Amino acid sequence: MDRESDVARATFFGLHALQHRGQESAGIAASNGRRIKVHADNGLVTQVFREEDLKVLTGHIAIGHNRYSTKGATRKYNVQPYLINGPGIEFAFGHNGNVINAGELRREMQEWGVTFRTSSDSEVIAHLFANAPGQTWGERAAYCMRRLKGAYSLVIMTNNELVGIRDPLGIRPLCIGRVNNGYVLASESCALDNLGATFERELDPGETVVITEDGVQSDIWSGTDRSTHSMCVFEHIYIARPDSTLAGKLAHRARQAMGRELAKMHPAEGDLVIGVPDSGISHAVGYSEESGIPYGEGLVKNRYVQRTFIQPDQAMRNLGVRLKFNPLRDVIEGKRIVVVDDSIVRGTTTPRIVEMLRKAGATEVHVRISAPPITSTCHFGVDMSTLDQLIAANNSIDEIRELIDADTLGFLDVDHLMRAVGVQDDSYCRGCFTGRYPIPVQLEMSKMELEEPMGVEGD
Ligand code: AMP
């Protein structure tokens, strides 16, 4: 960066663009070459940072993090970036993903005398890096990649280095771009666009990039196996913003293609196709194109109510759906509506949408879902960790249709989904739809696995 004080502000804008990836907490760490300062708290990016907070985060390198928890409670001690002091090393650390052998690694490191302050898997990864043998980040990453099982896209910052790491399976995204005289790393390319940065490329699975004043150095861990590359297909379906490019493809385009496949698989007799905003819109556009049924806006979303699924408990989610959507009565009334959404997870959103459409005068409601039924848990960074939460793990499609009170219901299947993404091989994790994962997992995982033994008190 050119001007010292801009680096935290740029990170703030980057986090703001990535708010959809996590809404529980936000934080930034900045280094001025001598010391690292961190500001982080529970809440949205705009709630956590005021002008004066950004002003003190001066320096030439910064990293930021938005939290969406898959392990550990929504408590202040879990907010990232963490500041880690290891033997002869200090760094700030941010993690996206979920590591399934964190419990075991934590116990091992506790025996070495490492103290843990949080209940998240992220801190386990951070301490593994702090205690890893090796002089360079590539060497440390090689050790950690051998030991860690699961998903981790990481940003790490020392006083004079910015490091980006993507796990050997490549489950969560991470990309690199250029801005002014510097570099920027981000989970999604939409953050680079907001900063006026140019997108260079996505990191490869197993890659470590180290950015210093001398430029970028890249290393791919020698144990990375191309045949196990397993990016999460749910990133394409739902998680990423539609204006982000993932695996070389604009998410909006992949979703449009899913909508088209869905229309081929499950045609409907309808007068109007609508999408559930925002994430169902691209899918609905594709469905309309393929089916020839006109597309229109039928639901208005209050943009200030954030993603309901991301709210960590069910009562909040129920309330969230009601506050979030309102139907356009004049558009809906007297019509057979085909409503397209990207996915049904717990079954909180869809029945409420159907009810709203019927109350607004829809004569029929046909629900089309642009993902296969989610019948298995996710172990790699999406918060669907127990089978009893998942409506499709416990009900047949016809039972779901009854529960949501739709006239008809159709889901995409895995083959059509992969056709839409443009891949026929195994290079994606689709475990939530198939129960087959890129590495062996336990049937369920406990989100609070690392909470109890810690003895962390208060917030
Ligand atoms: P549910 O209401 O639990 O069935 O969740 C499905 C709704 O939440 C859909 O409208 C999706 O757009 C959205 N959704 C799906 N997956 C996720 C996720 N991992 N995080 C947040 N929202 C999601």
Image: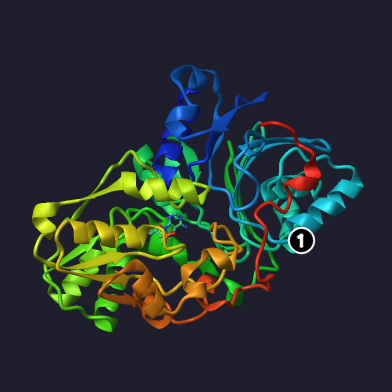
Of residue 21 and residue 196, the one placed in the foreground of this image is: 21
Query: Looking at the picture, which amino acid does disc 1 mark?
Result: Arg
Q: Position of residue 222 (x, y in %)?
A: 69, 66
Q: Position of residue 339 (x, y in %)?
A: 24, 65
Above/below status of 450 relative to 260: above
Q: Position of residue 35 (x, y in %)?
A: 67, 24
Left or right: 401 in relation to 407: right
* Residue depicted at x 35% and y 41%: 305
* Residue depicted at x 59% and y 62%: 385
Residue 410 found in image quarter: bottom left
Q: Is residue 15 visible?
A: yes
Q: How many marks?
A: 1
* Residue depicted at x 24% and y 77%: 263
Residue labelled with disc 1: 147
Q: Secondary structure at mark 1?
A: helix
The quarter of the picture where the C terminus appears is top right
Of residue 184 and residue 262, the one placed in the foreground of this image is: 262
- The local crowd at label 1, few if under 14, some if 14 to 19, many if 20 or more residues have their Cα within 10 Å, is some
* Residue depicted at x 21% and y 59%: 357
Above/below status of 5 relative to 373: above
Above/below status of 409 relative to 169: below
Q: Position of residue 331 (x, y in %)?
A: 10, 56
Left or right: 174 in relation to 210: left
Of residue 252 and residue 393, the one placed in the foreground of this image is: 393
